[in-house]
Image (cartoon, grey):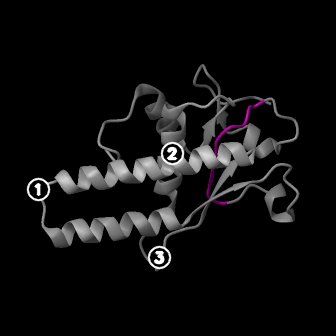
Amino acid sequence: MFIGRSPSPLQESLYAAFPSAFGFSGNEKNLEQIEAVAILGIAQTWKEEGDTDPHQVLFFVPSAAEMAWCLETLRGMARRFFQTLKEKPVSSNAKIAAAKTIKELYDHLQIGVRNPFEEEEIHQEPPRWVAYGYKDTDVSTPLWLRQKLLTPEGKGTSV
């Protein structure tokens, strides 16, 4: 209930498929999908035992237009999170601590356009990433990314 409601079956399908899937195959704007991808990305930033800082997570989008829409959606998600937090019957200190944590996690989600994937380090699959707006048939997109997109049927691709 990160954003004030339970995940939908579509969102649950991505979470259940992780780490075999890091996004959905498709390039239509879909709020349900972008929320799932963003939450999956934020979850990967989480500190594990022994970590001093959250992990950096790359959030791939194919164009500046998609990036703008994704950023606006992330802002909306943050507003809903803070509204949900505000309504929780916990102390002010607990609310402040939770707000600082979510800001820190959001700060480690690096959204950006990476198409074509020209940077040398992007030819190899990064350790932590998510993708939105790519299709499993996009030949200009690295195979490692295309293979980890859920199709509309909820299956990973076999490219």
Query: Mark 2 packing: few (<14 Cα in 10 Å), some, or many (20+)?
Result: some
Q: Identify the amino acid type marked 2.
A: Thr
Q: Name the residue under label 2.
A: 73
83 with respect to 112 (left or right): left
Residue 49: image location, x then y, percent: 41, 72
Q: Identify the amino acid type marked 3.
A: Asp
Residue furthest to the bottom:
52
Determine contact: label 1, label 2, CB under 8 Å: no
Q: Does the magenta stretch include residue 129?
A: yes
Between the C-alphas of marks 1 and 2, the distance is 26 Å
Q: Which residue is drawn at 20% across and 68% down?
A: 94
129 with respect to 73 (left or right): right
Q: Name the residue under label 1.
A: 89
Q: Which residue is drawn at 40% across and 29% down?
A: 8
Of the 4 image quadrants, the one containing the C terminus is: top right
| SS assignment at label 1 | loop
Q: Name which of mark 3 and mark 1 comes first in the sequence.
A: 3
Residue 126 location, quadrant = bottom right
Magenta stretch, residue numbers: 127-136
Q: Mark 3 points at which residue?
A: 51
Q: Is residue 67 magenta?
A: no
Q: Identify the amino acid type marked 1.
A: Pro
| SS assignment at label 3 | loop
Q: Name which of mark 1 and mark 2 comes first in the sequence.
A: 2
